[in-house]
Every structure is written in C-alpha cells, then in structure tokens.
C-alpha cells in the first residue's frame, strides 16, 4: 500500500526536475546578447541615496567618498546614512564626510528592511525626490551610476537593479569562487532574463526605486530578504524589476566558507518565507492577468525547490526506487544513457563553461580562474542549504555581517577605476576594473 503513495510523488518530482532543468538551460542563452552602446540622457531625476548602516564606521568612509565623486549634478542627489542601532562612530563619520544622517533606535524591530522603511519615510518628509537608491555600507559605487539610472528612469522604468560586482575577488579561494558565482548570475541569469523580457530581482544593494512606486504600494518589506520581498510585492502590482548591466556597485564578499554559508542560509530562508507568503497572490496575478512575467518569476522564486528535487531524484537513482514509479516514458527520458550523458554535459556547462565565459566578459579579475576546479564545491553547497532552509525558514534571526576591510575606488588616467586595499591590510588585493 505504501508504494502506491510513492508512485505519484516520484513522478511529480521527475516532471519538476525536467522542467527546471530545461528552464535553466534556456535562460542563459539571453546572456550572450551584446550590449548596445548607451546614450546617456540629460540629468533630470533627483536621487536620494540611502546607506543602511549598523556599526559600519570602519568601512563606510570609502563608500561615502565614492558617492560624493559621482558624475552627476550635486544639487540633484543627497546621501542619507541610516544609522541603525549604531554603537560606534558611524553617524559622526557620515556627518563629517558630508552625508545627512537619519538615526534609528529600535532594539525589537531589527534588520535592513525596517531601517529602509524608516529611512524612506524620513527622507520624504525633508525633501522631494524622484527615486531612491540603496547601497550597502561596505560597497563602492562607480562614477556613472546615477547617470545611467537617470537614463533608465526617463525611459519609463520604475524599479531598477544595477550590476553587483565584487570588490575583493582575490582575497581568498572563497572570495574567488564567490566572485565567479556572482559574475555567472549577473550575466547568465539577470542580464539574460532582462534580455528575454522577464523580471530581474532586487539584490539588496545597487537598487533604484521610483518614489512614485514607494508612494503607491509602500515599502513594507521587513523579512530576512527584504529585496526579494519587495520584488514580488511589486510584481503582484504589475511592476517588474529591470536589470541595468552597466550601472555597477562593488560588494564585499566573505573571506571564509562558513561566513558564506551563514549569509546564503539567510537568503534561502528568506526566499522560502517570501514564497510561502506571496505565492498565491503572485500565481493569481499570472493566471488572471495572463502575466507571463509574474508566472516566470514564480519559477525564479521556487528555485530552491529545484535543488531539493534534484537531491531527491539523485537518491531515487542511487537507491533504485525508480521501479516504483508508473510513468515508463518519463523514466526512459530521465534515466536513459542519453539523459545521463546530458547530465554530464550540464555539469560541464554550469561548472566550467559558464564561469569561464562570465569571468572573461564581466570579471573584475581573471586571476580567479585558477580556482576553477573548486568552483563546483560552492555551487553544489546550495543543495544542503536548500534543505536546511526549508526546515528552518521560520527562524526570524537577523544576523549582522561585520565588515572590516577598507577598499577604495580610485581613478586611473584612462578614466576607469581601480579597487585598492591598503597595503598593510592585504598586499595583493588590487584589482583593475573595466
């Protein structure tokens, strides 16, 4: 009797696995489209740059310097540091650098989402802005960022996500493979999806949101992944997120593996939380409005389930449970020698071809390729993370990631930028940027 319950479960998982696999192979094709040379519009939009900061005195200085060096009329942007429950000199340093400071004290409602909700409201009381830009305190922002976002907003777009590059790819083997993972996601997922007409997702930093949107639907994203939550909330209201590949911010990545584990576990937990909370509304939007962008975003939102399905089917294959399924046609597709060969080709494609290509096209440093052989370790570590997050997604714990590295964005003679860490901190951390 028990086996009769196993039959449909295995078949459903098989079909899900097949669907997600085909999807994952098709989407990257959009990433090979060549970018057109951009014509920048005349600056018109007024920006409020928000930097949520919890005890970031050690690293926020270079970011503020890069903000005030933005190639955009100074009277058309203001920099706000949201000093969120700070116990150090973050607010004092921000004021000394010329930023406006919004101080927030709330020991119960902790986290970036709450800080942004408070900051948006406070800034709106002080001045009138056209768009909000959010940048993490340990980041750096490229000089043409606002010019590019201004151009995109004038074209009618409302929610924009800039490209998140890595400012410390050569620190350790962990930052190297993390950087390659970011470059793959940027090029073959978000840039690709944008080219295919689908929605990207906000990434927490490098975000640009029209104040018209914030006024109409509110922020209200206070979960573990506030960026994902607002992305889905906007989609339910018919507003997609557009990817802006040439508007770049540089993000710091953890130096050791356990830090990446903790950081990514929070992301996947948050993604499950958003999925369980918003799936019915997003699905209804897609069906009732014939909104294929919303329906595709469900696939993106449910990607952790693909990892779980992949794990289950690996166990089915290894243990021989496939004999209990009653769909022989699908069984031949998924477990034929042809399909096993396809799995091998997919492994090579995702683990080697894509990171090499993304590094060549977008990578800040090709030195990371020397760690290519351990890149699959990082990629396949998402499998146990997905399972752990599924069973612990109700854990609301917000964990602050401490940043201690000081890396600056400096100009070079040819007009490009270079990331430079102090020699006493890490002598080999200098990386050229294209």
Image (cartoon, grey):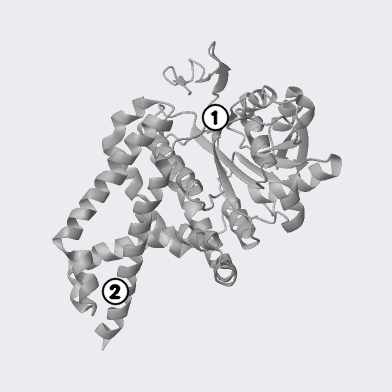
Number of marks in picture = 2
Cα–Cα gap, marks 2 and 1: 48 Å
Q: Is residue 223 visible?
A: no
The residue that disc 1 covers is 404
Residue in the picture at 49% in, 29% down: 167
Q: Which x, y percent locates residue 172?
A: 38, 30
Looking at the image, which residue sits at the far right?
A: 126
- Dividing the picture into quadrants, the one containing residue 279 is bottom right
Q: Secondary structure at mark 1?
A: loop
> Upstream in the sequence, badge 2 or badge 1?
2
Q: Which x, y percent locates residue 135?
A: 63, 37
On the rendered image, what quadrant is the N terminus found in?
bottom left
Crowding near the residue tagged with mark 1, few <14, some 14–19, many ≥20 C-alpha atoms within 10 Å: some
Closer to the camera in the image, 375 or 132: 132
Work out whether 143 lies above or below 352: above
Work out whether 195 lies above or below 173: below
Q: Which x, y percent locates residue 174?
A: 38, 36
- Dividing the picture into quadrants, the one containing residue 108 is bottom right
Residue in the picture at 66% in, 23% down: 65
Q: Secondary structure at mark 2?
A: helix
Q: Is residue 372 visible?
A: yes
The residue that disc 2 covers is 10
Left or right of 51? Residue 32 is: left
- Mark 2 in CB contact with mark 1 (< 8 angstroms): no
């Amino acid at each position: 009797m028990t086996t009769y319950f196993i039959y449909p479960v295995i078949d459903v998982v098989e079909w899900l696995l097949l669907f997600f696999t085909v999807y994952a192979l098709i989407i990257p094709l959009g990433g090979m489209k060549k970018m057109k040379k951009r014509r920048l519009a005349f600056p018109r939009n007024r920006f409020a740059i928000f930097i949520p900061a919890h005890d970031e005195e050690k690293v926020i200085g270079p970011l503020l310097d890069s903000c005030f060096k933005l190639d955009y009329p100074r009277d058309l942007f203001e920099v706000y540091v949201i000093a969120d429950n700070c116990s150090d000199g973050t607010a004092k340093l921000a004021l000394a650098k010329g930023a406006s400071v919004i101080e927030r004290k709330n020991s119960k409602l902790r986290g970036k989402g709450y800080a942004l909700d408070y900051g948006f409201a406070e800034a709106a009381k002080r001045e009138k802005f056209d768009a909000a830009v959010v940048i993490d305190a340990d980041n750096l922002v490229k000089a043409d960022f606002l010019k590019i976002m201004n151009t995109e907003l004038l074209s009618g777009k409302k929610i924009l996500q800039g490209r998140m590059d890595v400012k410390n790819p050569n620190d350790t083997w962990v930052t190297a493979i993390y950087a390659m993972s970011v470059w793959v996601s940027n090029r073959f997922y978000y840039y690709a999806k944008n080219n295919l007409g689908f929605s990207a997702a906000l990434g927490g930093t490098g975000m640009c949101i029209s104040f018209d949107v914030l006024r109409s639907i509110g922020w209200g994203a206070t979960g573990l992944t506030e960026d994902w939550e607002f992305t889905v909330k906007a989609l339910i209201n018919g507003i997609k997120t557009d990817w802006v590949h040439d508007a770049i911010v540089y993000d710091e990545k953890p130096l050791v593996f356990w830090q990446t584990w903790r950081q990514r576990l929070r992301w996947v937990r948050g993604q499950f939380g958003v999925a369980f909370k918003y799936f019915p509304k997003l699905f209804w939007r897609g069906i009732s409005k014939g909104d294929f962008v919303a329906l595709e975003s469900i696939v993106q939102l449910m990607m952790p389930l693909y990892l779980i399905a992949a794990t289950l089917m690996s166990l089915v294959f290894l243990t021989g449970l496939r004999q209990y399924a009653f769909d022989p046609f699908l069984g031949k597709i998924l477990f034929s020698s042809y399909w096993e060969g396809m799995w091998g080709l997919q492994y090579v494609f995702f683990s080697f071809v894509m990171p090499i290509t993304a590094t060549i096209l977008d990578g800040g440093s090709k030195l990371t390729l020397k760690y290519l052989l351990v890149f699959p370790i990082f990629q396949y570590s998402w499998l146990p993370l997905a399972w752990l997050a599924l069973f612990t997604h109700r854990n609301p714990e917000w964990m602050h990631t401490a940043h201690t590295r000081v890396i600056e964005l400096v100009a070079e003679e040819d007009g490009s930028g270079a990331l430079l860490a102090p020699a006493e901190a890490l002598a080999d951390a200098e990386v050229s940027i294209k």
